[in-house]
Image (tube, helix red, strand yellow):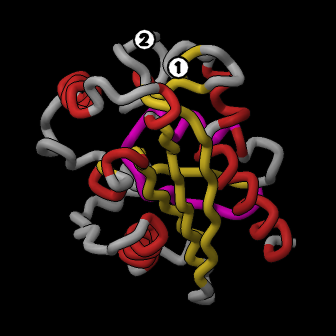
Amino acid sequence: MGHKIIFATGNAGKMREIRDILKDMDLEIFSMKEAGIDIDIEENGLTFEENAVIKAKAVSAYTDAIVLADDSGLEIDYLNKEPGIYSARYLGEDTPFSAKSKNLIERLEGVPDEKRTARFVCAIAAVMPDGEVITALGTIEGRIGYREEGENGFGYDPIFYVPEYGCTTAQLSEEQKNRISHRYRALEAMKEELKKRII
């Protein structure tokens, strides 16, 4: 078996997506939980990239495997790029995403389509066994809808409308979403970097 990678997340949906995207590489991919690493990480960076690096470095202290971490969120232009790096913590960490989404839609009350532009951003950081840090960024552009639509996906997917598909990311199949998502784009860029380093 090839190299071992630990992805610093406990999110099952995310792990599925990561395994799917990296399946053509000879890698064993474990979540933090599967690797037996249970630590609290304070994400106090000011950008998605800083937070991804903080997470990856924190986990790499416990292993000699390659560690990947991501930080992602939703930027809404009209709201000064909120919720941004606070996407998961917006209105409190334990607040359900439906309540977060409803609040964002209310804050955009009366705002026309062309001003509802938004993007999902994903930064991925890798810490190699020799301590080298690599980062990659992926984005997907869209707009904020007027109501929640779609049952697939997670987080803010039901309010993120992708004009070229004519639906929200929660209305795309997992396969479709995995081929256009911000995480897919960041992982694809990271995959190219890893290929250069993993012989």
Q: Quadrant of residue 130?
A: bottom right
The residue at which mark 2 appears reads as 149
- Corner quadrant of residue 176: top right
Residue 86 sits above or below residue 180 on the image: below
Q: Residues within 10 Å of mark 1 (few under 14, many from 20)?
A: many
* Relative horizontal placement of residue 88, taking residue 165 as reference (left or right): left
Question: On screen, 85 above or below 66?
Answer: above
Q: Residue at x 21, y 49 (%)?
A: 89
Q: Residue at x 56, y 76 (%)?
A: 127
Question: Which residue is painted at 42% across and 11% down in the image?
Answer: 149
The stretch in magenta equals 1-20
Q: Is residue 4 shown above or below 119?
A: below
Q: Is residue 156 left or right of residue 15?
A: left
Please say whether residue 62 is visible from this viewpoint: no
Left/right placement of residue 149 relative to residue 190 reads: left
Spatial distance from mark 1 to mark 2, Cα to Cα?
7 Å
Q: Quadrant of residue 112?
A: top left
Circles 1 and 2, Cβ within 8 Å, touching? The answer is: yes
Residue 132 in the image, given as x and y percentages of width and height: 62, 86
Badge 1 is on which residue? Answer: 168
Identify the residue at horizontal 36%, vertical 32% (top origin): 155
Q: Mark 1 or mark 2, which has the lower sequence index? A: 2
**Total numbered labels placed on residues in the image:** 2
- Residue 13 within the segment the image draws in magenta: yes
Question: Label 1 is placed on what type of residue?
Answer: Thr
Q: Position of residue 135 (x, y in %)?
A: 61, 72
Q: Position of residue 69 (x, y in %)?
A: 49, 61
